[in-house]
Amino acid sequence: MPAHDVLIIGAGLAGQRAALAAADAGATVAILSKVHPVRSHSVAAAGGINAAIAQDDDWRSHAYDTVKGSDFIGDQDAIEVMCREAPEEVLHLEHIGVTFHRNETGNLDLRAFGGASMKRTAYVADITGQAILHVLYEQLMKYHQRLDSYEEWFTTSLIQDEDGACVGCVARDIRTGRMEIFRAKNVILASGGAGQCFKPTTNGLICTGDGIAQAYRIGAPLMDMEMIQYHPTTLAENGFLITEGARGEGAHLLNSKGERFMEKYAPNKMELASRDVVSRAEQTEINEGRGVGLDGQGIYLDITVVPKRRVLEALREIVNIGKDFAGVDITAEPIIIQPGQHYIMGGVKTDVDGRTPVDGLYAAGEVACVSVHGGNRLGANSLLDTLIFGRRSGEHAAERARSMPMPKIPDSRLRQDELWIDSIISRDKSGRRISEIKEELGTAMNRNVAVFREEKGLQTALETVQRLQEEAKTSYIDDRGTVFNQDVLGAIELGYMLDCAESIVTAAIERTESRGAQFRTDYPERNDEEWLKHIDLVKSSDGPKVSYSPVTITQWQPEERKY
Amino acid sequence: MAGLADTSVISEDEAPKAQSFTLRIRRFNPESGQAPYWVEHTVELEPHRSVLEALLQAKARFDGSIGVRCSCRAAICGSCGVRINGQPGLACHTHLDKALAGAKDGVIVVEPMGNMPVIKDLIVDMDAVHWKKIKRVTPWLINKEPIPEREYIVEREAMVDVTQTMACIQCGACVSDCLSMEVDPEFIGPAALAKAYRFVGDPRDAQQFERLNDLSHDPAGIYDCTHCFKCIDACPKGVAPMSQIMRLRRRAGSDHHITDPNNGHRHEQAFVTLVKQGGLLHEAELLPRSYGGDSWFGKFAPPAGLELIDSLPVITKAVLRRKVTPKAALLPHKIPKQDLKGIQRIFNQIESKDQRLEFNLYISGTDEDNMETTA
């Protein structure tokens, strides 16, 4: 039974950053992930990372932009921590080898991004997430004697002691099917978001909300779950991400009449307003019959206004995406996009050190909700979130481990999960296929819990999710083997997704106002008097139990949000 | 604005229609005790959908036990490296209509990548080969000291340059079909050497000479590549691993004057000299010049003699099999004077430049960027 001071589940940016920080603090570390670390979905982050690094910038300006972007329900103490520590973190990345773009003087170049009051986004072409993730993995290889990496291990559940503290996890070696208990003084969840609850989504097939559900199942509260980001520019064809960097470099959004319609919705920031604002504007144009493409469900993104040389150098990846996945040369003609599910602002509730209310359990990155993003995340703040709170979690967990003994876990705990998996594998073929349930879930969520929401649609979504939860219990799989049985993992992931979806819909029904990404057509106004608060959800025998927690306000009072 | 059509809305009828595509998938279950076998599945998808989508549909509808790694579906996570009709690449990055055009009998053949052991179905053991080789090249930055308080000040072009190798997604497609690695499994290989260039080309790295010296001296290092271009064809991200290997050689040989015990650098020089002088390669001169010095007198140097004696069995075999004739060995092929002049003009043109011209995708773009047709 492996035993470590700090066990990290998930090896994207948050997980790898936590592992390196905990190892630097002298802890014994294990990092465990269901995919090889460089396959983690952080790899898909394109545009860049925000930091008030320019001489004439100030972290307070970055913090204010973030607060305003969050529609004033981001916790300002956490936002201050993130924005204050951002420049140092970006310089650290530069020092360990990230190949950030330079300007003519050889300093870091910065590009414009949505919702930001000045250029403060450092970037590597449009593969920033990939570049940072691969450089962190270089460091992980450098640290190979100081930390244990378990690649392609799937976590089935978190383990608690009698007092409710988290003391490890049960995981399955995907290559062999062997189950193992991982003991740990502290567990850091860094297993990413839950985009697969929606179809289409920009998220990878691995983003199934595992950590959110695992924490929820042992009693950790979830927060801000109703806040689902629809990215303004996803390929109409199949939901692939077209980076906000395109608009940062100057690209225009046009409706079927060729109008730059953003001047109606955000006359100052135009295409670079907050993502929720731009997505709503696009959806309004589409709904009012000014869309383009198939059934008029799209909008033109015109990148031809950006100089071709700059596109080839700084937006290479979307040149490829246009060519390979839409058959469009983006340097010569506009590409058709639409709002698409991209990010989940909510997650496992944590403090600024990544601690959840469950002793010994931390969370960082998209799985967590600190909350720095509140109602709407600014572009290029997610990479920052993963790194800052990944590092802080790693450091804090390492420190906490110093003063405590290694917990003991009875071997019998393993049996419980082995039996669970055996029962899935041996189900008879009377139920539905996993793939059918997943498809129905994604479609229902995207129809009813999208850019515009209303009571009736949300109730329909909730009924669907609850029915699918029942059907999932008897859904069957084909693979009865042990080596790389992806089928059985898919069945477990489906359960995680349904837990996440139930929380998302429950919170969206609860919040009867419009704020950030939550726009209720039946409650179209923001209502600070009643709703300047977070919705917390705790698992109970009859679904998620709702409570509220206050928003932390330090120096910025809520005001009208205009771009 | 460019290209905005008058009728910008497309109806269902005009949208591409789903068609039938049949996949033949190579399957292997290590637990069955049986040899690999092939299965066929027919799926319904639009022609511009990917082979990965077809595999996922087969998995969803017919058999959930088909093993394939995948996540992003957009050629950025690097999980779904496979061979399609014998060609390595990403399943998500290959359109069904293109795959069908390359299929022999109307069936798209999908099998696991080569040069790596198969774990199950389309899943190969990347750790055993790919990652082992990546770890061979000390794959992390060794910082120039002192580390500055703020960022390192480096040339803009230098960062854009290494971004091309940073764009590698570690999918293994180049490793799959590397011919040198097939012959010499010890070869460090295209992906790992491209990774090495990412540090050698990075002005913040303190050990560029040491890295190049190491990779030149290793018999499985930069001179073990045979220029077959397979990795350039295979790479879905335009990393062009072979080009990076050639750049490592230029930096090692020309910039750092590293002469390697494998004679790789001298061999390359002899090659270039012969082509420059005669317009064509003169094989019989190549070996003595590589070992004895890059001139006509090279053949009289003792190391060349030793190497010739050492190579006698190979030479004899080649003569017996008529790969070379004694006449052709002594008298080089000649090309018309005019053509020779043309070739020498190319040499003069290149050598007259102050700076070495380096091809880089991010700086100079590809031919496709400037042409309508694709290769």
Image (cartoon, rainbow, N blue to C red):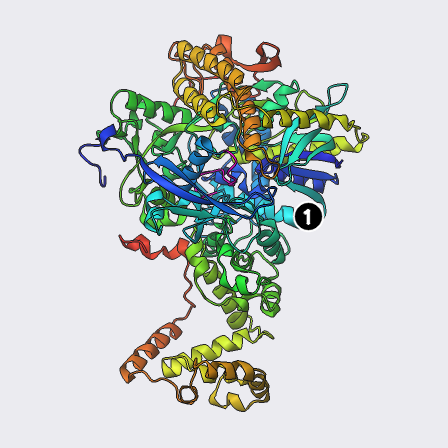
Q: Is residue B107 above or below residue B345?
A: above
Figure label count: 1
Q: Is residue A51 visible?
A: no
User: Which amino acid lies under the numbered mark 1 shown in the image of this protein?
Assistant: His
Residue A241 seen in the figure: yes
Can you give x and y, in whole percent of width and height, for residue A209 in the image? 55, 27
Q: Which residues are magenta?
A: B64-76
- Please tell me whether mark 1 sits on a helix, a strand or a loop: loop
| Quarter of the image where the C terminus of chain B is located | bottom left
- Residue A370 pos. (x, y %): 59, 24
x and y percentages locating residue B100 in the rendered image: 34, 47
Q: Is residue B247 left or right of residue A215?
A: left
Q: Residues within 10 Å of mark 1 (few under 14, many from 20)?
A: few
Image position, residue B250 (x, y; %): 49, 69
Compared to residue B348, the image places residue A281 above or below, namely above
Residue B68 on the magenta span: yes
Residue position for label 1:
A144
Q: Examine the rendered structure and indicate whether residue B335 appears above or below residue B177.
A: below
Q: Quadrant of the N terminus of chain B?
A: top left
Left or right, B255 with respect to A182, comes to: left
Residue A40 placement: quadrant: top right
Q: Residue A451's quadrant in the figure?
A: top left
The rendered magenta stretch, by its main secondary structure, is classed as loop
Q: Is residue B352 magenta?
A: no
Q: Nearer the viewer, residue A446 or A93?
A: A446
| Residue depicted at 57% across the width and 83% down the height | B307
